[in-house]
Image (spheres, rainbow, N blue to C red):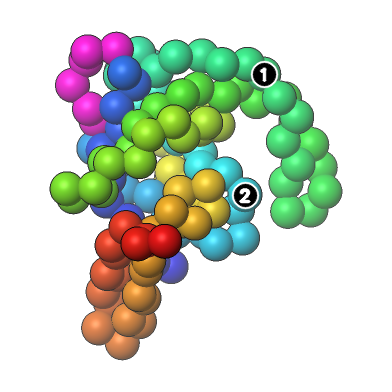
Amino acid sequence: MPVLEMSIDGYSGRPPRALKTLIDSGADGTMIPIDILEAVDALYEDTVQMRGVLGESELVDRHTVAIHIGPLTIHGIHAVAIPTGEDGIVGRDVLNTLAMTLNGPANVTQIALNES
């Protein structure tokens, strides 16, 4: 599965934290381990229902963060907190802001901001 290295900024003045995430074009939103959200003191927004791929739903906490991918910054991402130790997921809320090329044979992901 393709991965994306990024850093997470909680807008708190604390330094951003690096995170390797799985690219999931089937996920509506981005999910970040709670220890990363706590480390950057990300702003808690609210608790919402999240439905999984099999239709089950659970209550999850949302936090506002900025995501840095190399020199690119995407502000105002409403990330769902997931348990510490799980892989982060970057979903369509972030992916839809990017022009991305996945080159599987070369194991390379190229990303640029959309110009539109």
Q: Is residue 65 above or below residue 50?
A: above
Residue 84 in view here: no
Task: Say what secondary structure mark 2 lies in.
Answer: loop
Q: Position of residue 20 (x, y in %)?
A: 31, 48
Q: Tell me, for residue 86, which label it has, or none.
A: none
Residue type beneath disc 2: Asp
Q: Quadrant of residue 6?
A: top left
The reply, left or right, for residue 19 in relation to residue 85 is left
Instruction: Work out whether residue 25 or residue 71 is closer to the camera in this orientation and state it.
Output: 71
Q: Position of residue 11 (x, y in %)?
A: 31, 18
User: From mark 2 to mark 1, how far is it between C-alphas?
Assistant: 16 Å
Residue 88 highlighted magenta (yes or no): no
Task: Name the residue at 24% across, 47% down.
Answer: 72
Residue 13 highlighted magenta (yes or no): yes
Q: Tell me, for residue 28, which label it has, or none.
A: 2
Q: Residue furthest right?
A: 55
Nearest to N terminus: mark 2 or mark 1 = 2
Q: Is residue 56 above or below residue 101?
A: above
Range shown magenta: 12-17
Which image quadrant: the N terminus?
bottom left
- Name the residue that disc number 1 marks: 47
Instruction: Work out whether residue 95 or residue 90 is closer to the camera in this orientation and state it.
Output: 95
- The kind of secondary structure the magenta stretch mainly shows is loop
Q: Position of residue 21 (x, y in %)?
A: 38, 49
The reply to whether the C-beta atoms of the residues labelled 2 and 1 are less than 8 Å apart is no
Task: Say what secondary structure mark 1 lies in.
Answer: strand
Task: Name the residue at 26% across, 74% down.
Answer: 108
The reply, left or right, for residue 42 in relation to residue 70 is right
Q: Residues within 10 Å of mark 1 (few under 14, many from 20)?
A: some
Residue 9 in view here: yes
Q: Position of residue 24 (x, y in %)?
A: 52, 59
